[in-house]
Amino acid sequence: MYKAPAGDHGRRGFDWASWAAAGCNRQHGLCRVRYARRRQPDHRAIHPMPKPNATSIDSRSLRWVPLVLAVCLNGCSYYGQLAVGQLELLHQREPIEALIADDSRDAALRQRLSEVLQARRFASQALALPDNDSYRLYAELGRPYVVWNLFATEEFSVKPLEHCFPIAGCVAYRGYFRQGAARGEAARLRLSGLDTHVAGVEAYSTLGWFADPLLSSMLRRNDEQLAALIFHELAHQQLYLPGDTAFNESYATFVEREGLRQWRASRGLPQRDEQARVRYRQLVELLLDTRQRLEQLYASGRPVTELRALKQAEFATLRQRYRHLRDSRWNGDRRFDRWFAQPLNNATLVPFGLYDRWVPAFAALFDANGRDWERFHEAVAALAKRPADEREQALTQLAE
């Protein structure tokens, strides 16, 4: 996902009533939460505490659902669709073990879910990730994605409009359970002069409030990719720092990659060919370079008409540079052609760089803790407690 992260941070000081009481304030047509409680300063990230099992969390959280729904539906339609979408998802869940035991269900699905349970057990037993009901349940969606994320920027800015929410803190997107709602809001924002981008999301996490199910949208991946996604999402449940997307996603991405490497080794499989990851990294470098060039352009103080023309020229150059990279260094690998076929703007560049900025730093931290998962998770939690500037300095030093 763009994945909505999860974890104990932020949740311990939050209650559903505060969320329901939060006001809605319009800025560029996007709701921004006005907190009904005092925000915790950044340096007070909390070490993950032992959590109750998912069943008790569901039971405790569901008591607030009627109030949340009533206030959301009468106050802000955006929060209303979030509440309704989440409730629908909860009601679609069924235990994977029961589904596997049901001979009337599709045999191929049962086989895939059996593989999922093996990866799920490995996550808790070998990677020290939360041992709860998440991903031991299944939900059939009947659609290709669970949510659609909407990114938006000003016409001459590469910085995304941020949206602040209870629990999750501030993020660079808003999620919608219906594609039409996301695209409708995107169209409205474009009319006001913003750049927008809508991206489908296979999975997200509820920060440990509910037992997150394995979704039919996740089954688009092969077995190994699915295991990696589960490791990633459980890492968000293990630890989440509100308001620091790069930290959260880099941590989860490291857990995903190292977890998959160990998962393959445990099954006697050879390590994966790194070619695809290398090519993706090269693509991200190309996109980040374009974003930097645009940032310099927008800061140049040129007239608006000139900025518009030069902006379009930069995106034309990006496409040209991609084709050269594809044909000269990737032997004609066209896997990213579809992405480049869409209209490109500032907002399409927003997601890149969020997921792996600090991965080398977390890899170094893992090695420094003897490649012991419990010690590593504790060290990451200690980093999360530090003020933002100190945390970034420490990550920079680790990555060197």
Image (cartoon, rainbow, N blue to C red):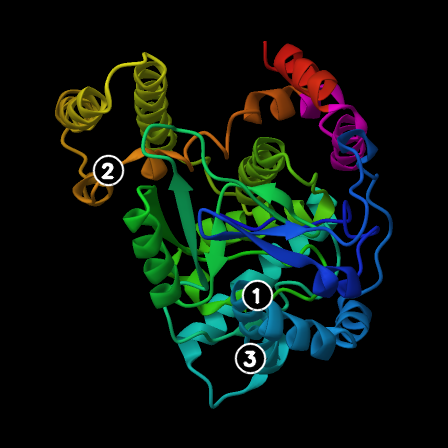
Give the residue pinned by disc 1: 76
Real-space CA distance between mark 1 and mark 2, rounded to the nearest whole angstrom = 31 Å
389 shown above or below 372: above
Q: Nearer the viewer, residue 160 or 257?
A: 160
The first of marks 2 and 3 along the sequence is 3
Q: Amino acid at mark 1?
A: Cys
Question: Is there a contact, CB below 8 Å, between mark 1 and mark 3?
Answer: no
342 shown above or below 57: above
Query: Residue visible at 62% across and 31% down?
Result: 247
The first of marks 1 and 2 along the sequence is 1
Real-space CA distance between mark 1 and mark 3, rounded to the nearest whole angstrom = 25 Å
Is 399 displayed left or right of 57 in the figure?
left
Q: Nearer the viewer, residue 137 or 16?
A: 16
Is 217 displayed left or right of 22 in the figure?
left
**Location of residue 342 in the rendering, given as x and y in whole percent from the top left corner:** 20, 45
Q: Quadrant of residue 310?
A: top left
**Location of residue 82 in the rendering, given as x and y in whole percent from the top left corner:** 55, 66
Real-space CA distance between mark 2 and mark 3, rounded to the nearest whole angstrom = 36 Å
Is 102 displayed left or right of 180 in the figure?
right
324 shown above or below 218: above
**Location of residue 248 in the rendering, given as x and y in whole percent from the top left corner:** 62, 37
Question: Is there a contact, CB below 8 Å, between mark 2 and mark 3?
Answer: no
Give the residue pinned by disc 3: 92
Number of the front mark, 1 or 3: 1
Residue 330 in sight: no
The first of marks 1 and 3 along the sequence is 1
Q: Is 386 a magenta residue?
A: yes
Q: Amino acid at mark 3?
A: Gln
Segment tinted magenta in the rendering: 365-387
Dominant SS in magenta:
helix
